[in-house]
Image: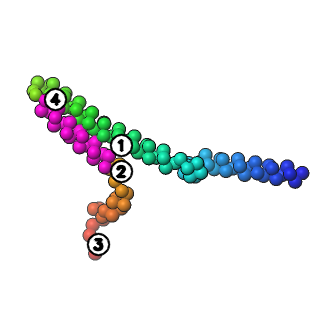
Amino acid sequence: MGKETDSSRHAFDRRLKQAMDRNNPDRAAQATGQGGDMTTVGTVLRAGTEMVAGLVVGVAMGWGLDRWLGCRPLFLILFSLLGGAAGVLNVWRLVRPQDALEDKPDPQAGPDR
């Protein structure tokens, strides 16, 4: 009878640990060792998407304006550069260090007296 209680206690502990891991993804990621890799892949995919999206929107706007106004590809070139710059800015906002955000003074707080 002691063996049954002992094995059921181990089974309960194992099921409890699995349930806790399902409810806490950080703990499960640390246990498997894969949490950091998937976060890095997600960040890289998002950065690439931000760059491409900014450039596509800029090119589309420039092409549309050139076609609508019937002029040379002046707006296409201009908006391509602006879209590329917007993409770079979005990627910079994504990957900038979080410490830089904490060091900024709060403009709403006003001067210290």
Residue 95 is tagged as 2
77 versus 2 height, above or below: above
Residue at image mark 4: 65
- Secondary structure at badge 3 equals loop
Between discs 2 and 1, the one toward the N terminus: 1
**Rendered position, 71 above or below 4:** above
Vertical arrangement, residue 95 with respect to residue 70, above or below: below
The percent position of residue 111, horizontal first and vertical second, equals 26, 70
Task: Identify the amino acid type marked 1.
Answer: Ala
Q: Quadrant of the C terminus?
A: bottom left
Whole-angstrom CA distance, mark 2 to mark 3, is 32 Å
At mark 1, the secondary structure is helix
Q: Give the mark nearest the N terminus, 2 or 4.
A: 4
- Mark 4 → mark 1, Cα distance in angstroms: 27 Å
Callouts 2 and 4 close, C-beta under 8 Å: no
Q: Which mark is residue 99?
A: none
Mark 4 or mark 1: name the one nearer the start of the chain: 1
On screen, residue 52 versus residue 26, left or right, reads: left
Residue 13: x and y, percent?
A: 72, 52
Q: Identify residue type, mark 2.
A: Val
Q: CA distance from mark 3 to mark 1?
A: 39 Å
Quick one: label 4 or label 3, which is nearer the N terminus? 4
* Mark sitting on residue 112: 3
Is there CB contact under 8 Å for labels 2 and 3? no
Which residue is labeled 1 in the image? 47
Q: Nearer the viewer, residue 106 or 57?
A: 57
Residue at the (75%, 48%) spot, across then down: 11
Q: Are marks 4 and 1 in contact (CB under 8 Å)?
A: no
Mark 2: few/some/many CA within 10 Å (<14, 14-19, 20+): few
- Which of pointers 3 and 1 lies earlier in the amino acid sequence? 1
- Residue at image location 19% in from the left, 27% down from the top: 64
The secondary element bearing badge 2 is classed as: helix
